[in-house]
């Protein structure tokens, strides 16, 4: 049975990216590797849409999230954490692990956060030093209005940290234009390589805060994730520690693919695929879960007559298509189909056609071909 990976991470890896990892390993302290690293950093800045520092960490995206917390927060300071899903909650959990006081902004799962609510929170509490928000909340399929949030936080002393792990390369993000101080991302989503690399961009406002923390000796403990040490190495086109060299070679290839297609075309492709997927879902009489849906992943409410866990299992075991179920309190209540990274028109068609058949076999009242027809009308 042919396999199709349509989860919101890891995502499918292009053949040319896979082959790049078969090359003989090279040492990371050589001129040959530094030349590759310099090219990769330049191309990452293109995707981040920034002229500021961008660093590569050997970790999952969560490593970059933790790096943002330990370098920006100081003892006795408060963080505003937007919690609208599992990954918004993760920022809060990291803060709490380091003893950081948080003000939680609890957003109903499936809803986007109101930028106005963030503005009000910053106005009433001058102790908030950092705002943590997620651009695309993978667990719910929601995209937040980070551009508006960036304009609001820019006018305050607070630093804005954006989780773009399932957004970078698939959902529009203009780091510098939107005034985003710190943006974190991961390798296994829109950037089309296996898990194992994390990325973090840092602007001058964020650096000023980090430097003040160091000068005043109010830093949270860090070693591997110390961005000051990381910056010193990257200024010499180097890493402070041994990097996953093969993944960096893969990243070089995937970034070349993005540049060849052009970032605007990449984002337009994601918008088209998302629109087609949503049209197909609605044609089956199903409901999109996210009120502000992302272009990287579509979340769908499971019909009342259907076992949500069984649906995901049948898609995989009977049709070879791996999608994701709900997380946390959404387990069994939604399913999620990704269309990010190395995804194209027929990935949407294949996913929808198999979904139709699985739902039909599970007794749901769906019309075979309805989803595919609706999607095709968008795609042509």
Image (cartoon, grey):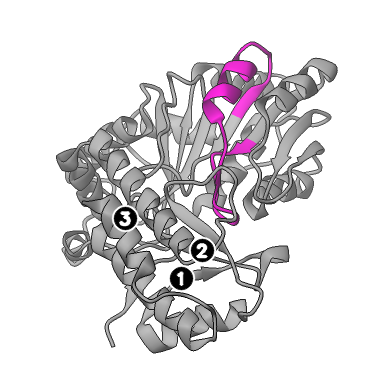
Does the CB distance between marks 1 and 3 fall below 8 Å?
A: no
Q: Earlier in the sequence, mark 1 or mark 3?
A: 3
For the point 59% across and 57% down, which residue is it? 139
Image position of 218 with respect to 270: above or below: above
Q: Marks 2 and 1, Cα distance to the nearest angstrom?
A: 6 Å
Q: Which residue is mark 2?
A: 336
- Residue 201, magenta (yes or no): no
- Which of pointers 3 and 2 lies earlier in the amino acid sequence? 3
Q: Quadrant of the N terminus?
A: bottom left
Q: Nearer the viewer, mark 3 or mark 2?
A: 2
Position of residue 49 measured from the top left corner of the image (x, y, whole percent): 36, 27
Q: Secondary structure at mark 1?
A: loop
Which marked residue is nearer to the observer: mark 1 or mark 3?
Answer: 1
Question: Which segment did they paint magenta?
Answer: 133-160
Query: Which of the two labelled residues, at mark 2 and mark 1, occupies the earlier sequence position?
Result: 1
Residue displayed at 52% across by 46% down = 293
Q: Are marks 2 and 1 in contact (CB under 8 Å)?
A: yes
Count of labels shown? 3
Dividing the picture into quadrants, the one containing residue 45 is top left
Residue 323's disc number? 1
Dot 2 falls on a residue whose secondary structure is strand
Name the residue located 73 percent from the left edge and 64 percent from the top edge: 329
Which residue is labeled 3 in the image? 192
The reply, left or right, for residue 103 in relation to residue 358 is right
Rounded to the nearest whole Å, what is the CA distance between mark 1 and mark 3?
A: 17 Å
> In what element is the residue under mark 3?
loop
């Amino acid at each position: 049975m042919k396999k199709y990976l349509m989860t919101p991470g890891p995502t499918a890896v292009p053949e040319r990216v896979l082959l790049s990892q078969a090359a003989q390993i090279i040492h990371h302290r050589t001129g040959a590797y530094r030349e590759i690293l310099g090219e990769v950093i330049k191309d990452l800045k293109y995707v981040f849409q920034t002229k500021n520092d961008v660093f590569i960490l050997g970790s999952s995206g969560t490593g970059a999230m933790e790096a943002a917390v330990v370098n920006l927060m100081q003892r006795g300071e408060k963080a505003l954490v937007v919690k609208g899903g599992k990954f918004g909650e993760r920022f809060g959990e990291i803060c709490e692990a380091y003893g950081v006081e948080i003000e939680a902004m609890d957003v109903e799962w499936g809803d986007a956060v109101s930028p106005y609510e963030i503005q009000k929170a910053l106005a009433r509490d001058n102790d908030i030093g950092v705002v943590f928000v997620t651009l695309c909340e993978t667990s719910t399929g929601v995209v937040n209005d980070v551009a508006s949030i960036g304009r609001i936080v820019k006018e305050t002393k607070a630093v804005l940290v954006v989780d773009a792990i399932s957004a970078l390369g698939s959902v529009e993000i203009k780091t510098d234009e939107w005034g985003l101080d710190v943006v974190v991302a991961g390798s296994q989503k829109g950037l089309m390589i296996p898990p194992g690399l994390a990325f973090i961009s840092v602007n001058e406002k964020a650096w000023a805060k980090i430097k003040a923390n160091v000068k005043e000796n109010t830093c949270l403990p860090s070693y591997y994730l110390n961005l000051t040490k990381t910056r010193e190495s990257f200024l010499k086109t180097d890493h402070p520690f041994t990097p996953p060299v093969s993944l960096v070679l893969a990243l070089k290839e995937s970034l070349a693919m993005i540049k060849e297609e052009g970032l605007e075309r990449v984002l337009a492709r994601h918008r088209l695929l998302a629109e087609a997927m949503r049209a197909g879902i609605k044609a089956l009489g199903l409901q999109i879960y996210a009120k502000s849906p992302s272009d990287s992943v579509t979340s769908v409410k499971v019909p009342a007559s259907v076992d949500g866990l069984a649906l995901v299992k049948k898609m995989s075991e009977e049709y070879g298509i791996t999608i994701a179920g709900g997380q946390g309190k959404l387990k069994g209540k939604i399913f999620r189909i990704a269309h990010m990274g190395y995804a194209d028109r027929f990935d949407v068609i294949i996913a929808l056609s198999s979904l139709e058949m699985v739902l039909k076999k599970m007794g749901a009242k769906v019309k075979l071909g309805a989803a595919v027809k609706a999607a095709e009308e968008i795609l042509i």
